[in-house]
Image: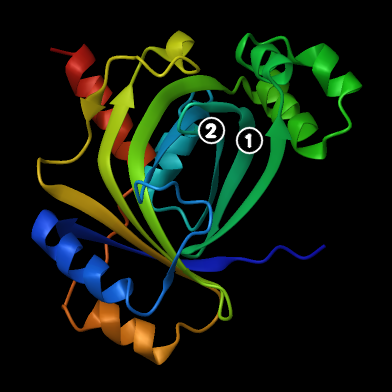
Amino acid sequence: MKKVFRNEWKYLLSNQQLSELKSRVSQVLELDPHTPPNGSYLIHSLYFDDHQNTSLKTTNSGLSKRFKWRIRYYGDDLSYMVLEKKEKLEGRGNKKSCRLTIDEYTAITSGNVLNIAYDTEKPLIKELAADMLMHHYHPQIIIDYERIAYVEPITNVRITFDTKISASYELDKFLEGDYLKFYVMPSGMNLLEVKFDDILPSHIRHLVESYGYKQTSFSKYMYGRKILNNYMNI
């Protein structure tokens, strides 16, 4: 099956800019149907890298073709946990994912992937296991943030506002959620992401471009690693 890569535009917004744009976006797009009653949801991601920090280096250099491995769950619901491989190609993104059980998570994060590579029927777990065995990928950092998401189902557009982005090195506490956190962005700054297929409808494009925001290549993973590296070197 041919991979489908989507456009991913990113912008840094102040609290005021976020509030203004969210108000306008909410008038033309729908809230993500999985959004809880409070209007936002918490995302926990455990990112992997190899001993040479290949994912970090390729992101930092802006290499046109790169990928990252991560495990993710939402809020405090451990019944829905996913393994994801996020690939980038010339600024566009593709994401492959599969559900993970707690046992599969435990096997992966403990490095006991040889048996699971043979036992699992999930191709993505086999692919991660191969990277772990051959290239020594292993958990590196936790990235947390709160997300407000809007969608336009007909044209497959997704607009998200990510706030309170933080990083943690307490990897063994990933499923508990009570780890020490270091905020990645300056106080009052947030991340806007606009994801779409080939064409962004003109009325949505106007919403974003009318404010004159400048696009950024901001990576939560890369800046999280930098924040933690600075802390550890103090």
Q: Secondary structure at mark 2?
A: strand
**Could you tell me residue 25's position as x and y percent?**
31, 73
- Percent of width and height locating residue 147: 36, 48
Q: Quadrant of residue 75?
A: top left
Residue placed at 18% from the left, 40% from the top?
185
- From this view, report whether residue 117 is shown above or below residue 185: above
Instruction: Please name whichever residue, 72 or 89, is drawn nearer the observer in this view of the structure.
Output: 72
Whichever of callouts 2 and 1 sits on the residue coming sooner in the sequence is: 2
* Residue 207 appears in the rendering: yes
Q: Quadrant of the N terminus?
A: bottom right
The residue at which mark 2 appears reads as 73
Say which amino acid is labelled 1. Val
Which residue occupies the foreground of this view, 135 or 103?
A: 103
Q: Are marks 2 and 1 in contact (CB under 8 Å)?
A: yes
Give the crowd class for mark 1: few <14, some 14-19, many >=20 residues within 10 Å. Answer: some
Residue pictured at 35% horizontal, 51% vertical = 39
Q: Which residue is mark 1?
A: 82
Task: Check disc 2: other Cα within 10 Å, few if <14, some if 14-19, many if 20+.
Answer: many
Asked whether 200 or 219 is in front, the reply is 200
